[in-house]
Amino acid sequence: MAVMQCRPGCAACCTAPSISSPIPGMPGGKPAGIRCIQLDEHGLCRLFGDPARPAVCASLTPEPDMCGESREHAMLWLQRLELETRPAPVIGSALAPKAQNRHPPKKRVISRSTCEELPPAGISST
């Protein structure tokens, strides 16, 4: 069986997924949807074969299901993979959903006797 080759100029696998390990020029890794800084003007990896290339990059090889017939197909496939494999947010982090109260807040009842008499709108009280 022939090994599938990368589509020239595609670079979907270097754009769509996030990379959590450091990359030269991107010490904090790469967020999903951001083009890797190590791509050249032809969409080829400058680190190909270099030990500084993240292991996750080396493990991602072109496959017909992933690459499809177009860059758009590959981007959508990889974006779906990114969503399906994203770790759950840590409770208390900025990415975690806000905790929902189990009980709705109690309604405050304000009686007429506790309210100040306010002047009609547009009329100053001084």
Image: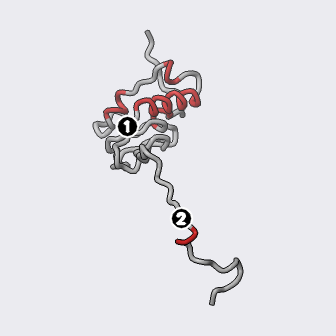
Report whether residue 8 is seen: no
Question: Which label belongs to residue 110?
Answer: 2
Of badges 2 and 1, the one in the foreground is 2
Residue at the extreme top of the image, as rendered = 1
* Extreme-left residue of the structure: 51
Q: Residue at x 49, y 23 (%)?
A: 66
Which label sits on residue 58? none
First in residue order: circle 2 vs circle 1: 1
Residue 3: image location, x then y, percent: 43, 16
Q: Residue at x 35, y 27 (%)?
A: 59
Give me the residue at 50% from left, 37% from top. 43
Which of 111 and 126 lies nearest the eye of the viewer? 111
- SS category of the residue bearing label 1: loop
Question: Does 35 sit above or below residue 2?
Answer: below
Q: Is residue 46 visible?
A: yes
Where is residue 62, by image quadrant? top left
Which amino acid, by three-letter code, is at mark 2? Answer: Ile
Residue 15 on image: x %, y %: 48, 38
Location of residue 46 in the rendering, given as x and y in whole percent from the top left corner: 40, 40
Q: Quadrant of the N terminus?
A: top left
Q: Quadrant of residue 116?
A: bottom right
The quarter holding residue 9 reads top right
Tell me which amino acid carries mark 1.
Answer: Ala
Q: CA distance from mark 2 to mark 1?
A: 42 Å
Tag 2 secondary structure:
loop
Residue at the outermost front position? 113
The picture places residue 49, in percent across and down from the top left corner, at 33, 33
- Per the rendering, the mark at residue 88 is 1
47 or 81: nearer the viewer: 81
Vertical comparison of 77 with 50: above or below? above
Q: Quadrant of the C terminus?
A: bottom right
Is 94 in front, or is 76? 94
